[in-house]
Image (tube, rainbow, N blue to C red):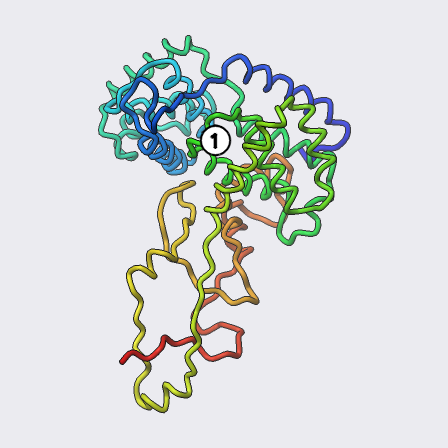
Amino acid sequence: MKCPGPSQSLRLALFLENALASEARIWKVPVFQDLILKGTDISLLCYEKVVLWIAEINSQFQFYPETFALAISILNRLLASVKAQLKYLECIAISCLVLAAKTNEEDEVIPSVKMLAVQSGCKRSPAEILRMERIILDKLHWDLYTATPMDFLNIFHAMVMSSWPHLLHGLPQMNPSRHVALLTKQLQHCMACHQLLQFKGSTLALVIITLELERLTPDWFPVITGLLKKAQVNSTKFIHCKELVDQELMRLQPSNAIYIFYPVSQAIQAHPKARLPYHCSSEWKGSHRVRLRKGPLSQLVSTAFTSAAAPIPDDAMEADEYYDGFRHLYSEDGGAESGRASGASSCPQLRPGEGSSPCPPLQPPERD
């Protein structure tokens, strides 16, 4: 399927209508009071940690982003329906992911419960996970599927591309599937934020689309106004959610380092046969790290220095694993053997000694 055109607007409107009906019927979220889940001993920190853990496992087994979103939806509905204890939270979380995988994934992709428990580091036995699955199914009346924020993100993005097919033409190495992959990363980050639990998935997805359109074009308002009417989103909640999401997405952007230039000529005069020693404190190392995606939020790696002539956008690298799946939605098979391979090759990394800057290398100040 290529980028949606006017002829598909009715289909997209029907998808949105069905998703909104499903959300209105099933949507539930847990309520926190004084940083504790109401009626339980589960803290906000424990909740956010378990959401990030589900995201890592989802990435480890290369499940769809929709599977992660459905797992979080099942988790939230269960925590809103029963008074769970902290000691069972890990077992509940892994069981929610197993149920979401059985709903969304192909059978050959889903690992055995034993393999999933071992490779994920879960301390629960397969028998305990299977028992928890049955408990969750019973509490949710075997009605697992609901429209997730990921579903709404895909629908809204397709609607925008239908109304604005040339929106991404000014962006290098960008197309609809890569673009929605970047937005998926932002959405997954926001789904781990407890402050955004109060908003429905339709509101959260539309806010992420809005913030992206604000960044891309000054004529974003008419498109968003139309989507607000179709999505039946309350304007007050929308504005509040937009402020919170904007703050959360700022945390995804790595901070810019500030360097002090020390003339190399003085260093050569003072140390003609030796280079200046390089001192790097542990505080400096800890403050200049970004997340690169093995999982959505998995391991921390140190930032690499790149030339201004060959910048590597972090968001594009982190979304490469999503790109392979999304590109098939828009029939973007040309120019790439595989999504991950093409994402890596399109952003060449700078090797040591290949910098194009004529300036001498920066050196730390001489210490007495």
Please give left or right for residue 12 compared with residue 61 in the image.
right
Q: Is residue 267 above or below residue 78?
A: below
Of residue 2 and residue 22, the one placed in the foreground of this image is 22
Residue occupying the far front of the picture: 34
At label 1, counting other C-alpha atoms closer than 10 Å, the crowd grade (few under 14, some 14-19, many 20 or more) is some
The quadrant the N terminus occupies is top right
Could you tell me how many numbered marks the image carries?
Answer: 1
The quadrant the C terminus occupies is bottom left
Within the image, what quadrant is residue 103 found in?
Answer: top left
Q: Name the spot of residue 10 as percent of width and height, x first.
A: 73, 22
Please give left or right for residue 100 compared with residue 9 in the image.
left
* Residue drawn at (37%, 19%) of the image: 79
* Residue drawn at (70%, 22%) of the image: 11
Q: Name the spot of residue 60 as percent of width and height, x first.
A: 37, 38
Q: Name the spot of residue 90 as percent of width and height, x first.
A: 28, 27
Within the image, what quadrant is residue 274 found in?
Answer: bottom left
Q: Amino acid at mark 1?
A: Leu
Q: Is residue 251 above or below residue 50?
A: below
* Residue drawn at (47%, 36%) of the image: 190
Q: Name the spot of residue 107 as percent of width and height, x first.
A: 42, 24
Q: Secondary structure at mark 1?
A: helix
Please give left or right for residue 354 compared with residue 179 in the image.
left
User: What residue does disc 1 label?
Assistant: 196
* Residue drawn at (53%, 45%) of the image: 338
Within the image, what quadrant is residue 181 found in?
Answer: top right
Residue occupying the far right of the picture: 6
Q: Is residue 180 above or below residue 230?
A: below
Of residue 109 and residue 118, the one placed in the foreground of this image is 118
